[in-house]
Image: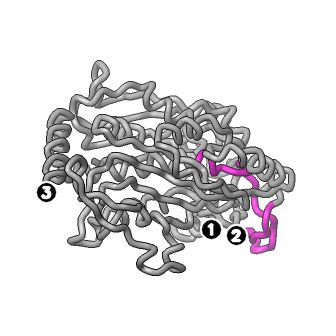
Amino acid sequence: MRYLTAGESHGKQLTTIIEGVPAQLRLLRDDINESLIRRQGGYGRGRRMKIEKDLVEITSGVRHGYTLGSPISLVISNDDFKHWTHIMGEEPIDSDTEIKRQITKPRPGHADLNGALKYNHRDMRNVLERSSARETAARVAAGSIAKIILKELGIDIVGYVKQIYQIEADDQSHLNINDKKKRSNESPVRTLDQKQEQAMMDAIDQAKKDGDSIGGIVEVHVEGVPAGLGSHVHYDRKLDGRIAGSVMSINAFKGVEFGVGFDAARRRGSQTHDEIGYDEDRGYYRATNRLGGFEGGMTTGMPIIIKGVMKPIPTLYKPLNSVDIDSKEPFQASIERSDACAVPAASVVMEHIVAWEVAVAILDQFTSDTMDQLKEAVSNYRERIRLF
């Protein structure tokens, strides 16, 4: 299973084409829209979330509510494009006509300058329109289909906020996954720690007042994954590596860790690894889950616990210094519409990114032309490893 996205931030639409989804999966537009609406929410989002209402149109691969096994195409129209037609339209312009809203001042922390250097663009709008985090809407749309596949297989997933700026949520690992989903959806900042909600919102408000931005840490919890997904036999088949790379591809993410993660550097081996046990009902299990559900690039059957670190958004209303690529003179970076904090929304994005990679690993490992075949194959595999 794979997907491809296309579209610019202020272009006509975002498009996702997905190949490899099993036939006979029940897929409704409302299921995808639910994920897109969650991505747009969260305290700290900017004005654009009030302009754009991300809703999907399924244009191929689904008939009467069920997938066909052929490529699925999803379209998210940009309602704001009507105001950007002369700036982002595909029609040629007169060479004598000045390009509107041309950008020659790269913003520190963005792809602007590096993309301009690579593709030889004198107008860096050609870079920032595609490198914008708005592209994650197309990826969430793809991930929402992955989540539906996982749900059919008894695998559940949730993302939530662990930290915003210097405000850390207290450990809530005692909550089951359903309680985590409920609290995350009810929280304005998608945290599980209700006592820290207001402090997180206050930090966002202060950053916005200061013309600044703040980042944070999000966590994703996946439950019901069978042991043995991924492989030890080659580097690019290690599932934790594939998940880590995918998470790092999310805009503004700068770090990933599984389980105790970087804290393992401060522990002894006896405090880091998970002892193995066995009982007749569930088969092999781990007494703890310090490694976040992975050993040797493969799942252990324990919940996958993965954190991602998001840097502060680099578009600031008190912009940092930059250099005009035309005049080479120092200047303050251009300002585009932005959020003071997008960490709550990023938890939704990461949830769907992880869901995609887990679903791909399952479809790679098991017969999956149809959902019935896939469910039977996974069920047989679960029983085999339980009796191993």
Magenta stretch encompasses residue 192:
no
- What is the spatial separation of the Cα atoms under label 3 and label 2, in whole angstroms? 64 Å
Instruction: Name the disc covering residue 284, or none.
Output: none
Tell me the amino acid under the disc marked 2.
Answer: Ile
The percent coordinates of residue 348 (x first, y second) are 53, 44
Classify the position of the C terminus by image quarter. bottom left
Is 323 a magenta residue? yes
Q: Picture coordinates of residue 184 (x, y %)?
A: 58, 40
Compared with residue 113, is residue 100 higher up or lower down, i.e. above or below? above
From what the image shows, is residue 244 above or below residue 366?
below
Residue type at tag 1: Leu
Give whichever of 344, 20 is nearer the camera.
Answer: 344
Please name the residue that numbered disc 1 is placed on.
113
N-term-proximal mark, 1 vs 2: 1
User: Which tag, 3 or 2, sits closer to the chain's start?
Assistant: 2
Q: For mark 3, what is the residue?
A: 388
Where does residue 332 sit, x and y in percent of width and height? Answer: 81, 64
Are the residues flagged by discs 1 and 2 in contact, CB closer than 8 Å? Answer: yes
For disc 2, the marked residue is: 325
Q: Secondary structure at mark 1?
A: helix
Q: Which residues are magenta?
A: 319-346
* Point 14% across, 52% down: residue: 387
Q: Give the SS element for disc 2.
A: loop
Q: Secondary structure at mark 3?
A: loop
What is the residue that sits farthest to the front in this orientation? 279
Residue at the far right in the pictured view:
209
Q: What amino acid type should be assigned to the residue bearing mark 3?
A: Phe
First reached walking from the N terminus: tag 3 or tag 1: 1
Q: Is residue 234 among the parts visible in the rendering?
A: yes
Alpha-carbon span between mark 3 and mark 1: 55 Å
